[in-house]
Image (cartoon, rainbow, N blue to C red):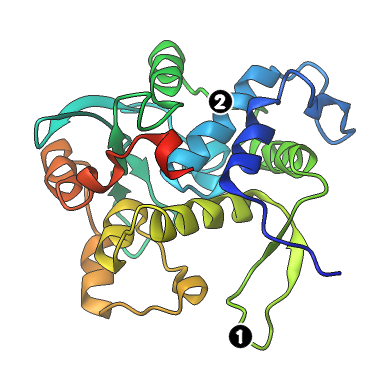
Amino acid sequence: MPPIFPTINQIRDRIEQVGRSINPINDQRVARDVDEYQIHCALKYQYIIAGKSSEISGKYQPKENLVYSVEVEGIDSLCFPVQTTNQISERVNYRGPTIPFNNKFEPWAEEIFEYLQDNKNPFQFAYNDSSSKRLYEAAVTYTFKGMHWLMKSPETQDSRWVDFSSQCLRRARILELYSVYNFELIDLLLYGGWDDDDLLKISVDQNLRLNMGKTEFNLSVMKMLAVNYIHKLCIPYEQVH
């Protein structure tokens, strides 16, 4: 019998158990002096922003301008300026995934906001960025042991099941936004800035992709872009999951 996709609740439950019943420091690739609550929060942060591991604990990990409390269309929201890994030009590029600042809509909103407010370099697990990224990826793999993900669309000939990894966590968030919150292509692009359209079998105008890839850090612009999708996220979590 082939594997099946884990549900969003199953994925979130695994993350909630990190530092409780799930202990990544038991993995020999993870140092025993690593703070497991730090891993716990890194997983929540990655899921919320639909990030890549290098945006969490690698070259582009957050160090400053981590999160802003903003108002978008009258909705108290959190904006996360994320330095992107898709460097089309030499200048620093950003995207700004934004969520409602209300635990009714996003159960992790308040916890992540407080954690990012209280910590500088919040997800630095090792002395250098590459080691930190490898350690984090090992912790993710340990956390989701036994779960699998289909990395391409079922219609694609080279689709295959893989062990759940950091990349799968990003894909799970994409799928949630697309199938649960009815994000359209432009919403996905504005929120995640990704090129993972193989999953959803969608395409995007290359000029639009290039323009989005050259966004500098500008909070007012990020708030303006969030207007396109913030209302779609204002559904009680318990109602849609």
Q: Which residue is mark 1?
A: 156
Dividing the picture into quarters, in which one does residue 57 lie?
top right
- Can the viewer see residue 19? yes
| Mark 2 residue crowding within 10 angstroms, few (<14) / some (14–19) / many (20+) | many
What label sits on residue 41 in the rendered view? 2
Residue lying at 11% horizontally and 38% vertically, measured from the top left = 220
| Left or right placement of residue 137 versus residue 198 in this view | right
Secondary structure beneath label 2: helix
Q: Nearer the viewer, mark 2 or mark 1?
A: 1
Residue in the image at 42% along x and 28% along y:
63
- Kind of residue at disc 1: Thr
Q: Would you identify the image quadrant in which residue 67 lies?
A: top left
Coordinates of residue 194 in the picture (x, y in percent): 40, 62
In this rendering, the answer to whether 41 lies above or below 177 is above
Label 1 secondary element = loop
Q: Residue furthest top?
A: 118
**Residue 72 spot, x, y in % from top left:** 13, 35
